Image: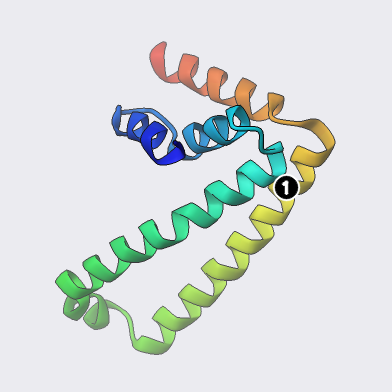
Amino acid sequence: MIGLVQCLALWPGTSRSMVTISAALLLGLSAPAAAEFSFLLALPTLGAATLFDAAKNGDGLLQAASLPVLAAGFAVAAVTAVLAMRGLVATLNRRGLAPFGWYRLGLALAVFFR
């Protein structure tokens, strides 16, 4: 069901994570569990996209940055993602999804009226 609802994210401007979280909430998951599920669901998708890009443009990437620099960037990104997810889950436990919803509405209005 969540996979089918994710097709809505093909519509430009639609947040894949919010569609996933909303579908999970409608199916009875808690907000923190829905957010964790959305994050975990993104890992194979982003991983496959990264591998595809590396296979296609890997030589240019290695010319622009050395392998140790790329490995350090990957490690920093992984740690940052885990910390961000922990912060999001802690916020969801305290305040729920309302702040994220208001942020998305405000952002949509700012983009619409720019």
Residue 56 lies, with reference to residue 68, above or below; the image says above
Closer-to-camera residue (18/84): 18
Q: Is residue 77 left or right of residue 35?
A: left
* Residue bearing mark 1: 89
Closer-to-camera residue (76/78): 78
Mark 1, secondary structure of its residue: helix
Q: In the picture, residue 15 is in which quadrant?
A: top left
Q: Which residue is painted at 66% across and 33% down in the image?
A: 28
Residue positioned most to the top = 113
Residue 57 in the image: x percent, y percent? 17, 71
Q: In the picture, residue 55 is in which quadrant?
A: bottom left
Q: Which residue is painted at 54% across and 52% down in the image?
A: 39
Q: Is residue 67 left or right of residue 41?
A: left
Q: In the picture, residue 30 is in which quadrant?
A: top right
Residue positioned most to the right = 94
Q: Which residue is painted at 72% across and 55% down in the image?
A: 86
Residue 111 in the image: x percent, y percent? 42, 20
Q: Which residue is painted at 57% across and 36% down in the image?
A: 24
Q: Is residue 37 left or right of residue 48?
A: right
Closer-to-camera residue (48/55): 48
Indicate the amino acid at tag 1: Val
Residue 81 in the image: x percent, y percent? 58, 60
Residue 87 lies, with reference to residue 63, above or below; the image says above
